[in-house]
Image (cartoon, rainbow, N blue to C red):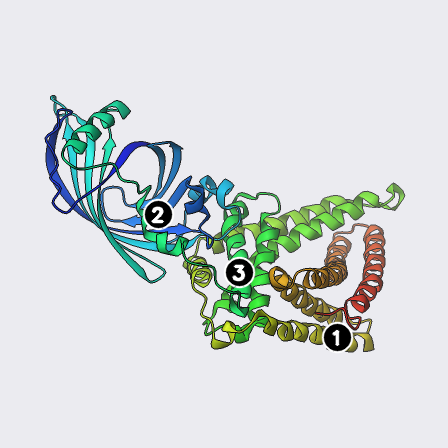
Amino acid sequence: MDVAEIERKFDAPPDAVLPRLRAGAYGPAREFALHAVYFDTPGLILLRSGRGTLRRREGGHDEGWHVKLAVRPGERLEVHAPLGPLIPDELRARLADLVGTEPLIPVATLLTRRTETDVLDAAGGIVGTVFRDEVTAEAAGTVTRWAEIEVEAVGAGAAWLDEVTEEFAAAGIHVSSNVSKYAVAVAPLANAPAVAATAGSVIGDYVRLQVGAVQAYAAGVRARTDDAVHKSRVATRRLRSVLRTFAPLFGPLPGLRREVRWHAEELGAVRDAEVLQESLSAFLAEVPAADVHGPVAARILGSLAATHAEARAGLVRSMDTRRYTELRIALRNLAAAPPLTARAAADPDTLVGLVRRTSARVAQAAAAAADDPGNPAGWHDVRKLAKAARYANEAIVPWSGAPAEEAAGRWEAVTELLGTLQDTQVARERLRELAHDAARAGEPTHTYEVLLERERAAGARALAEGRDALAAALEPGLTS
């Protein structure tokens, strides 16, 4: 629900007495206890933009999630959504142009004792509301207390607010310089001096980026937005990988990697079905007409569409569970305050050793795979470890710069090519199943043999190129 607000904020001296108004009479007072948690990005993008706030508030007649968007000075658009544990997708969408895929995390908690009084016209209609608030705010361990008065025009407009402002000023109550409660609460955090980077801060920033992607693409995953499943799945893979690679920096994360894996597998079932659809559709289009015998396209595409639909339905069901909600909350908490060990306080230089271990693991797996080159499982292991090396290097790019970025690029080439090899293996297994079904139905199987050969050849090319890329990535002096 969208609500336009025209309001003005005033400082409230302890002995301030509301003056009688020519602009209306005060109605009965109502008292509320409000508990609000304000959300922002780790870099306080919403605060610094001055264009919006996001809060979850309990108590009062309008409890729930609120986004406030600046329209013009003194006027804001407030968007409401029902109270719930997760940021509603529609509210996140309202802030997308400001926050992009940055994570939104709890930044400040405000406890407010509110006295609310309507201002009535001669006929008893509400023209405005006066809110007297005593606020206790906590942000980053700093507690701030203050009192303020807000006046909101309800049935009246800005001219009425101007008249009230004059009458308040005559009573010693003046317009406040504070833009919002949130701005007051986080002022100590926003003005804190910069601190030197640590191993924990470098990896923590990378973790937060992945949490932000999971948050940002959740609505698109449900709505079947192009590439949302793929991008969300990649974020979960990065999360799992970096939490494993840099485990010495983190304290206990009970069950978190397991739960991230669960969600990644739900996403993966959909994404794998999409990849299989794309690759087999492309190969089908290339098969000469003379090699097409029987209802091959209908059987293949119909079967893949059914698999994809089933996987999508399962994914959406999983996102409607309490388990998924608890995972999202755990990730939000991880982004807000990761449990770091003493080792995380070390210089970022200490990350290099952990990154190099990922390359060493790839080399070991590659040697084993080379001893049995026809076994796809060995190359699949190499690919998974190469992903860990890629993500580890990506994570330290903000600190290391070009060396890590170049290493990540080399590992990306390895993972993409060996990923193609894995995709051809999956496609061949599915084609054999479909050929078997076709044979049982009395249909020709020649076209399936043609497609199997194309997948085999594509896999062989990907393996050869992947091994070359692997050799380049493992070249002495190049691995990070």
Q: Nearer the viewer, mark 3 or mark 2?
A: 2
Residue located beneath label 1 in the image: 363
Mark 2 vs mark 1, CA separation in Å: 51 Å
Q: Are marks 2 and 1 in contact (CB under 8 Å)?
A: no
Q: Position of residue 183 (x, y in %)?
A: 35, 47
Residue 113 x, y percent position in the rendering: 19, 49
Determine the image quadrant of residue 70.
Answer: top left
Q: Nearer the viewer, residue 242 or 224?
A: 242
| Residue count near mark 2 (Cα–Cα under 10 Å), binned few <14, some 14–19, many ≥20 | some
Dot 3 and dot 2 residues touching (CB under 8 Å):
no
Q: Which residue position holds label 3?
A: 205
Of mark 1 and mark 3, the one earlier in the sequence is 3
In terms of secondary structure, where does tag 1 sit?
A: helix
Can residue 155 be seen here? The reply is no
Helix, strand or loop at disc 3? helix
Image marks 1 and 3: residues in contact by CB distance under 8 Å: no
Q: Label 2 is placed on what type of residue?
A: Ala
Residue at numbered disc 2: 183
In this rendered view, identify the residue nearer to me: 54 or 183.
183
The span from disc 1 to disc 3 (Cα, nearest Å) is 28 Å
Q: Nearer the viewer, residue 322 or 216?
A: 216
User: How many numbered marks, from 0 up?
Assistant: 3
* Residue 320 appears anywhere in the view: yes
Tag nearer the camera, 2 or 1: 2
Tell me the quadrant of the picture where the C terminus can be found.
Answer: bottom right
- Give the crowd class for mark 1: few <14, some 14-19, many >=20 residues within 10 Å: some
Given the image, on which type of amino acid does mark 3 rest? Asp
